[in-house]
Structure formats: C-alpha cells, structure tokens
Amino acid sequence: MTRSRPLAFWLFVGPFAVGLLLFTGLPIAWSGYLSLFDARGTVTPTRFTGLDNYAAILTDRAFLDSVGTVTAFAALVVPATTVLALGLALLLNGITVARAFFRSVFFLPFACSYVVAALLWRSALFPGTADGAANTALGWFNIDPLAWTGTVDPPLYWVVLVSARLWLQLGFYAILLIAALQRIPQHLYEAAWVDGASPRWQSFRHVTLPGLRGTLVAVLTLNLINAYQAFDEFYNILGDSRGYPPFARPPLVYLYYTSLGSGGQDLGRGSAGAVVLALVIALVTLLSGRALRGVRREPGR
C-alpha cells in the first residue's frame, strides 16, 4: 500500500509536470537565453550581445510607457473587480430562487473568448459611431455621440477596456467568493447576533469579511497578475487594419510588434522585454503579498 502511493502520485501528477516543463519552463528558459543574443527574424541566436538588449529595452520610452499603461489598467481593474465581485457574491448567495440559473448567467462570460468579447464590445457597444449601443443610450439624453476608442482627450478608451475586462471576469471571482461565503459557519453569525451585532453591516464587518480574508487575497493576487498580462482586449478593441494607435499600448502589445510585427522582428530584444515584464509581475505580486500579509493574519495572532 505504501509503495503504491508514490506510483499513483506520479501517474496523476507526472503528465502535468511534464507539460509544465515542456510548455512553460522550457520557453521561459529559452527566452532568457535568447535575450542575451542578437536574433532578428529567427529564434536561433546569432551573436552574443550580453545585456545590450536589456539596456535597449529599459531605455526605450515606448516600453516604459507601456508598463505605465498596464499599471494604470491594473489600478482601475483590480479594485473594481474585487469590490463588484464581492457585492455580486453576497447578492447571489442570498438568492433562494433559481440560484443555479443566476450563478450560471454571471459565470458564462468567463467562458467566452477574450477576442470575441473584445470584438463584441468594439462592434456593438462602443463602435464610436451613432449606431452603437452606448451612443444610442447617450442620445436618449440629448448627448452627442462619443468617439470611445478614437480619442485620448478625454481618454474614453479606458471605459471600454475596463468594462470589457469586468464583464469577462466578474462572474468567475464571484463564484470563488460564493464558495468561501458558504464555508463560514452559521453559528458565528448567530453568536454575533446574540452579542448585539446588526444582521447586515456589523455581521458583514465582523464575521463575513474575516471569513473571506484568504479568498480575497487570492482574488486580488490573481486579478493583479491577469491585469499585467492584458493583451486581447487592448489589441482587438484599439487596433484595426491600419495598425495599433500610438497610445495605450500594454507591454505585450509592444512586445508583439517588436518581436513579430513591424518592429524588425527583433526576437532578442523582445525576449529581453518579456523577461523584464515577468520580473515586474513577480515584483508587483511580491509587494502586494507583503502588503496583504496583515490582512491574511487572523485577528489576535
């Protein structure tokens, strides 16, 4: 029985570990190796350049602006998604009729492709013409149509990008929080009520929020990582047949043009940018984890 346990463990974990090594670990290692060479139009290193690609990428104003763009995107998306997902989870958890139906309705957008959602947002909701749903709604209040994705003053494209991301991810994080809500023992609420806590705000503050701490930290961390990996909604909402506009380029769009697009197919420099972006994501995740350490700690410990 004891000998069979390691065999069963590797039978289940082995295929996943091999896939992780081949399709994640190996490309990351090769990208790090390639970033030290000159490789234009080929994935085969041609000439060793040391850290020149890193020096070039870290002094490139376009790349630094792209990091600022995605940081602004994360600052808008992460708090909004977390707060709205928590509110939606509390609402759905309190529903007693057709509970599975309502949860499925809000979860379905998560199963939708980012590309499809971005094209839907751009063609039907915010096309920038008088026929779009958003401009039609503005017309009911005698407000002129807006060029949602074609102007930087004011930067209305943020409304389009953030609303698309919220629609896609809100249901998924709400389901995670509903699962955490159902793990909070009912007797804790009953004890709070006996001590005089109000059924809504005080119970939420002193029982619900402490019970959700671990899940909220996981939601914030996943949200943050996903925000820094943004590509599909930016590229498909703002880009068109003429290319991508010079504003609002996240790092992955910048690296796409540098490595595979009209930026000279410089895979060495693109690999250096990918390594820098991975380090930025790791640093932001570590800093957020350190900032949330106090939130994870149980009261009185």
Image (tube, helix red, strand yellow):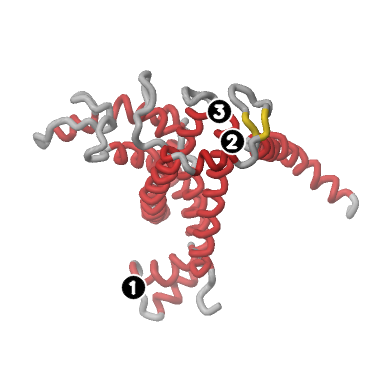
Q: Which residue is mark 1?
A: 198
Secondary structure at badge 2 equals helix
Find residue 271 and name its label: 2
Residue 66 versus residue 285 in the image, above or below:
above
Q: Earlier in the sequence, mark 3 or mark 2?
A: 3
Q: Amino acid at mark 3?
A: Asp
Q: Amino acid at mark 1?
A: Ser
Q: Looking at the picture, how far across and down is residue 124, in whole percent?
A: 30, 26
Of the residues tagged 1 and 2, which is closer to the observer? 2
User: Would you say residue 156 is visible in this rendering?
Assistant: yes
Quadrant housing residue 234: top left
Q: Residue at x 22, y 38 (%)?
A: 153
- Crowding at mark 2 (Cα within 10 Å: few <14, some 14-19, many 20+): many
For the residues labelled 3 and 1, the Cα–Cα distance comes to 62 Å
State how far apart marks 1 and 2 are (Cα): 56 Å
Q: Secondary structure at mark 3?
A: loop
Amino acid identity at mark 2:
Ser
Disc 3/disc 2 C-alpha distance (Å)? 9 Å
Relative placement, left or right, of 189 versus 29 is: left
What residue is disc 3 on? 266
Whether the residues at callouts 3 and 1 have beta carbons within 8 Å, the answer is no
**In front here: 78 or 212?**
78
Residue placed furthest toward the left: 142
